[in-house]
Image: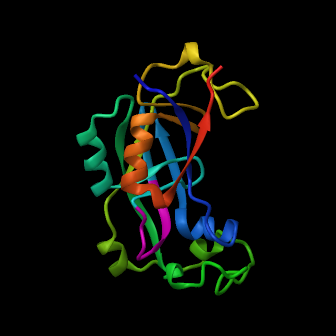
Amino acid sequence: MMTGYYELRGVEAPWGDYGDILLHGLIEEERDGEQTTRSVTRSGPLVPPITHPFGSILVTNDLREKLIAQRFSGLSFEPVKYQKVVRIAWEQWNSNAPEPAFYPDTGEPEYYLLEGTHDEQLAATMPRLWAWVVAPTKGLQVQGTNTFHKELHPGTDVAREYYITWIGERMMRWLGTNAGKWLRFVPVTPR
């Protein structure tokens, strides 16, 4: 029985939106009926085990295999392809500095990736990525908050509506041990 619930969020990146783009990248989703194709544009070579590009959650193949072994209920995975990989070793920059080492020419964060050159050799070395897929539960979220209606929770280890993902205590502890550097867990009280 789960004793606590948490909203799952990505870690706060340095340098605001600039760091978010460098850490999480950009994702595109194309739907064709029931089929969803996801592709990511991101920096490399660093790929954290779990990232949160614009409301999605992506995991590396290594973390996916470990998650599957834990048999968390409510969670499945779909493949993600790399659309573009730009070599920016931003993890070597001073993360305590008030500004990134450099800005894109346009000044807009996404242009680190959009204007950057695709590095085919780097892309070939990047870990396989998977989308973390949780079926939405209609009406679950208490509108205007980050919590949910307890009576509508599906009873799984992970649940979501819209872009908020909630996890139970067991999953929070496991993720904290295995990927905690890249995550934040915000306690919530169901209503």
Q: Is residue 150 above or below residue 118?
A: above
In this orientation, which residue lies closer to the viewer: 98 or 127? 98
* Residue 15 in the image, given as x and y percentages of width and height: 68, 72
Q: Quadrant of the image for the N terminus?
A: top left
* Residue 99 in the image, given as x and y percentages of width and height: 71, 81
Q: Is residue 46 magenta?
A: yes
* Residue 160 in the image, given as x and y percentages of width and height: 53, 31
Colour convention of the picture: rainbow
Tell me where the magenta segment starts and ends, as one range: 39-48
In this orientation, which residue lies closer to the viewer: 157 or 89? 157
Q: Residue at x 42, y 46 (%)?
A: 37
For residue 116, say whether it is visible. yes
Q: Quadrant of the image for the C terminus?
A: top right
- Residue occupying the far top of the picture: 151
Q: Is residue 56 above or below residue 81?
A: above
Q: Is residue 32 left or right of residue 69?
A: right
In this orientation, which residue lies closer to the viewer: 141 or 5? 5
Q: Is residue 124 left or right of residue 147?
A: left
Number of numbered discs overlaid on the protein picture? 0
- Residue occupying the far front of the picture: 3
Q: Is residue 173 left or right of residue 160?
A: left
Q: What secondary structure is the magenta-colored segment mainly?
A: strand
Q: Residue at x 46, y 77 (%)?
A: 118
* Residue 45 in the image, given as x and y percentages of width and height: 41, 77
In this orientation, which residue lies closer to the viewer: 49 or 181? 181
Q: Is residue 178 magenta?
A: no
Q: Residue at x 63, y 28 (%)?
A: 189
For residue 117, say whether it is visible. no
